[in-house]
Image (cartoon, helix red, strand yellow):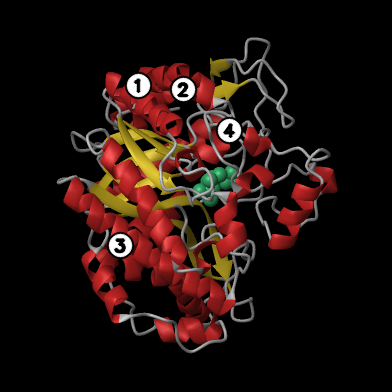
Amino acid sequence: MGEKSFKKGFLWGGATAANQIEGAYNEGGRGLANTDFLKYVAPNERRADEATFEQTYASLQEAKAHEDTYIFPKRWGNDFYHHYKEDIALMAEMGFSVFRMSISWSRIFPTGFEEKPNEEGLAFYDKVFDECHKYGIEPLVTMLHYDFPLAVCEKLNGFESRETITLFEKYVRTIVERYHKKVKYWLTFNEINAVRGFGPCGTRESDGKVRYQADHHMFVASAKAVILGHQMMPGSMFGAMYAMSELYPATCKPEDMFKRLQARRENWYFIDTMARGYYHPYAKSVWKHHGFDSLEITEEDKEILKEGQLDFVSFSYYRSNTVKKDDPWFNVGGSSNPYLENTPWGWPVDPLGLRHCMNEIYDRIQKPIFIVENGMGAIDQADENGYVEDDYRIDYLQKHLSAMADAINEDGVECLGYTMWAPIDLVSLSTGEMKKRYGFIYVDMDDKGNGTLKRTKKKSFNWMKHIIETNGKALDEKL
Ligand code: BGP
């Protein structure tokens, strides 16, 4: 393995999402979002296959009907809304040159349908971006990270309706006009390929034609955002974000390998269409597997997709999966992998898989890569001063960053930067827990929102600081 060096200007930082950090769900004129109704379910009350973010129309209505009896942790996040100065200062101390965050659509347009934006919401992000620039940190901004204005979900079934493209366009125009001098790096949608009820596309359906039609509307909405962004901000860079995991055939049986190709196309379908600007012929076979033959794609849509191609491809990478012939069509969990160890949450740890994914995407698309999520959720034990000896996290990151360096230096992959999920403890997407911690920075808060909210540095804080100040060279140092 070669030296772990990075080009000057490589962007080092951390990634977050509005609904998992901001809190203040009813302050500053913000409207309700679907994520305000994702409830906390104690682990012992949870079904084995249940993730709290699998929100269906029925579960949303049920949560609304019993609003007083449930706990909704995404309403308070880690209270970044009131702590952003302190949090950004800590990130600056680590040497971050990029901070990935998202804008909450319902802070800007409370229901999504207003004609005029909410000035208080816009002013909040002005302050956040100014704070970043004070320290030379570039914001990397996700336009939509799972949180829709509630009314858009309920009235239009998210992106099922073409009208949502128009609403999204209005939102995009507003934020691009406002922040064109403050934000250069943008991501249109987070994990656009992940499917969970109201999840990324905001629809009730998680499969079938409705979902794929909604995805098509998102492709068009994303391309329109890219076109607008390029016009209004020359030099701006646009990506969209995909959930990636390494994927292996469970055995070397040809049928398992072929299944791997088919399952992988559930990722390529999204990346190819948005980064190349057209539907690849295999798209039809994907649709067929989901029970339909065609989508409503207009000639104008095709033109927009062509013009609004992404500048870079970004993805989240936490783990790998395996797949075999008889697994369900799109198998997220995968069979276990005897060659890998798991995190406490049962996620296989696979740094070489990251290097492979970077190569596979770069070979295919030949546009720069940006790794915008990678990290380790764990139960951290803080001492009385809030200090956590998180050697396991350092170990995980050291291995993944080294694999990333090898992809860049040995394999020639072009990579713009790396934002670790998440620099500061926040509410987990999949379980709604605070207990599943990712940060370099510990937040004194429990699953139910109790605590002082005090921020303290974990052991990994200084480790990451050292990696950044040596621009990666210290990855070769013994832990
Ligand atoms: C990604 C999401 C994030 C984030 C992360 C970790 O899928 O984009 O929002 O939360 O996964 O997942 P979790 O919080 O479930 O551990």
From the image, tell me which residue sits under label 1: 131
Q: Element under label 3?
A: helix
Is there any visible trace of residue 337 in the rendered image?
A: no
Q: Is mark 4 within 8 Å of ligand 1?
A: yes
Q: Is mark 3 within 8 Å of ligand 1?
A: no
Q: Element under label 1?
A: helix
> Disc 4 marks which amino acid?
Leu
From the image, tell me which residue sits under label 4: 426
From the image, tell me which residue sits under label 3: 223
Q: Element under label 2?
A: helix
> Disc 2 marks which amino acid?
Tyr
- On screen, 205 above or below 141? below
Mark 4 Cα shell of 10 Å, populated few (<14), some (14-19), many (≥20): many
Disc 1 and disc 4: Cα gap in Å?
20 Å
Mark 1 Cα shell of 10 Å, populated few (<14), some (14-19), many (≥20): some
Q: Dots 1 and 3: beta carbons under 8 Å?
A: no
Which residue occupies the foreground of this view, 403 or 66? 66
Is there any visible trace of residue 219 in the rendered image?
A: yes
Of the two numbered discs 2 and 4 on the same chain, state the one appearing first in sequence: 2
> Disc 1 marks which amino acid?
Glu
Of the two numbered discs 1 and 3 on the same chain, state the one appearing first in sequence: 1
Mark 3 Cα shell of 10 Å, populated few (<14), some (14-19), many (≥20): many
Of the two numbered discs 1 and 4 on the same chain, state the one appearing first in sequence: 1
Nearer to us: label 2 or label 4: 2
From the image, tell me which residue sits under label 2: 84
Q: Dots 2 and 1: beta carbons under 8 Å?
A: yes
Disc 2 and disc 4: Cα gap in Å?
13 Å
